[in-house]
Amino acid sequence: MANLRESVQYPAGYAERWLREGAWAAERPFEWLAKWAAEIPDHPAIVGPGVEVSYAEFNDRVLRCAAGFDAAGIRGGDTVGLQLPNVPEMLIAWHALHRLGAVPTLLHMPYREGELAPLMNHGGVKAVVCWNGMRNYDAPTTMSALRQRVSSLGEIYVLGGDAPPGTVAFDELLAHAPRAIAKPSADAPCLLAFTSGTSAAPKAVVHPFHTLAATHRAMSARCGLSQEDRVLSAPPFTHAYGICVAGLTLHGGATAVLMPSFTPSAFAEALTEHRATITFCAPAHFLGALHTGALTEDVTQWLRMAVLAGSACPPEVFTQMEATFKNAAICQMFGMTEVLMTLMNPLDATRELRMTSIGTSVGGHEIRICEPEEGRVLPADEEGELEFRGPFLFAGYFGNEAANQSAFREDGWFRTGDLAKMDADGNVYMTGRQKDIINRGGIKINPLDIEAMVNDHDKVFLSAIVPMPDPILGERACLFVQLRLGESLTLDEVCAHLAEQDVAKVKWPERLETVDAMPMTPTRKIIKSKLVEVLQARLAFSTAGN
């Protein structure tokens, strides 16, 4: 069994500070569920396609599921993989494992055997709950095969279809009667999620109940959440973004609106059928739905707030959202798996701040902007690396000391790798990613602004700029575009468009590549490393052809 306890050990005085200041408390989200089940038992906790679950029913199923896991030998500290869409059972299993003190391990739905094996081995996954309802992916067979590669893996629980031989139907867990089970402590690990890293050295993020509950509580307050709200998460619950949306919804006693997976039509249907009042999404979710014509006025009329996070939001996209979600306040938010949800625009922020800034500190987090190499703290309005220290921050990557050495300063501040500015009032403005900067013969080119301008071209749906090796300059800029249906585009057209925007020629891309669809993370962020691989393959093919 992986000892995740070692990854929630904070420096001396750190936990004491947040407990003393009230940012941490001896509370766990499943206790909020029990509270609402007692106070508002008939209030809908979960609604989705063909389903409505009250708080009383939700709590009962969690207790039954916890008893089922307990009877199957799942114990405190055990890691259990969850590879499920946004369905009620995902949240039931999540809280049931928490009730036992076991640690849910988030496995993204697009992952297959090659991606899953190193992650599950690293986390010592003891059991897994998977979905048998996809046309092009046989999850139970994949998980059964993984038993040969993941020595710790035992039971495989199946949802969404029949449980094949050697697996167990998830419903069998719910057949157990609730039983008395000791509660885990608030400093126990309760989440294992993987962020960037290699298969040989994954970046495994572990959070205790303290940090998870703190971010849910603080974000619920920042959103002004009430029991009357219905909250739709476009991101999946197998990502920190999505599961935090589910948590803040629970804290407020609101209703979680489920959309099993994102499509423009499913997004529109969820907004309409369940009259969502708040939605959390990425710019790509919104643009994908907007360009299909799905977001009509009758679809969006109940929204009072739309929260954007996951990738940069150009001002023109913000303006489009305002025009589409006419009754909603549009806010930006910033989070990472390592620090959860840490920045968000206050609801009373001006339109200009909500359009240009990713927000101010939530829940007492400390923020600073530093010179990336020397670590010198920079004054207001100077660009540098965004760093955090506070009550939502994880203690360190599990089993990856090299990553910890590079991620934390000696004084305990976490380096995000994001470039940003902060004004004198604490508003943070994202300017790019350090690793995305292109060094063209000593001239540093930040792709973010260029991509926003290219995205504004009539023929372009999405764009991304990646570095292209050059023997003289070191790097040049290669532009990838996903075009609108039936369109074609030349590099000259792109450069002419940028010239009209007064972009210096040195910043123009020097190669254009098209793709049918951008590779995306589960939260709809473009995976630039995949584009780099595509570019390398195309360059190699071109060279071989010559």
Image: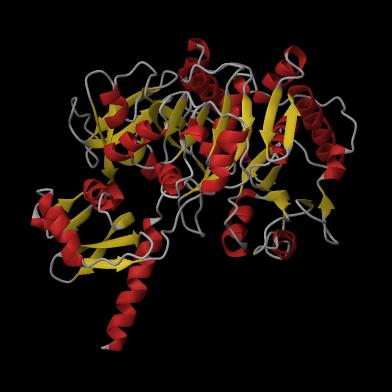
Vertical side of 145 occupied by 23: above or below:
above
For this view, does 215 lie left or right of residue 445?
right
Quadrant in the picture for residue 111: bottom right
For this view, does 208 lie left or right of residue 482?
right
> What residue lies at 51% left-to-right and 33% top-to-bottom?
298
Rendering coords of residue 180 (x, y %): 86, 24
User: Please, which colouring scheme is shown?
Assistant: secondary structure
> What residue lies at 87% left-to-right and 44% top-to-bottom?
172
Vertical side of 29 occupied by 51: above or below:
below
Vertical side of 445 occupied by 334: above or below:
above
Q: Is residue 104 visible?
A: yes
> What residue lies at 60% left-to-right and 53% top-to-bottom?
109
For this view, does 465 lie left or right of residue 277?
left
> What residue lies at 51% left-to-right and 59% top-to-bottom?
200
Q: Quadrant of the C terminus?
A: bottom left
Q: Is residue 399 visible?
A: no
Labels in figure, total: 0
Which residue occupies the foreground of this view, 232 or 531? 232
Rendering coords of residue 392 (x, y %): 48, 27
Rendering coords of residue 319 (x, y %): 31, 34
For this view, does 100 lie left or right of residue 369?
right
Rendering coords of residue 235 (x, y %): 53, 42
Which residue occupies the foreground of this view, 318 or 406? 318
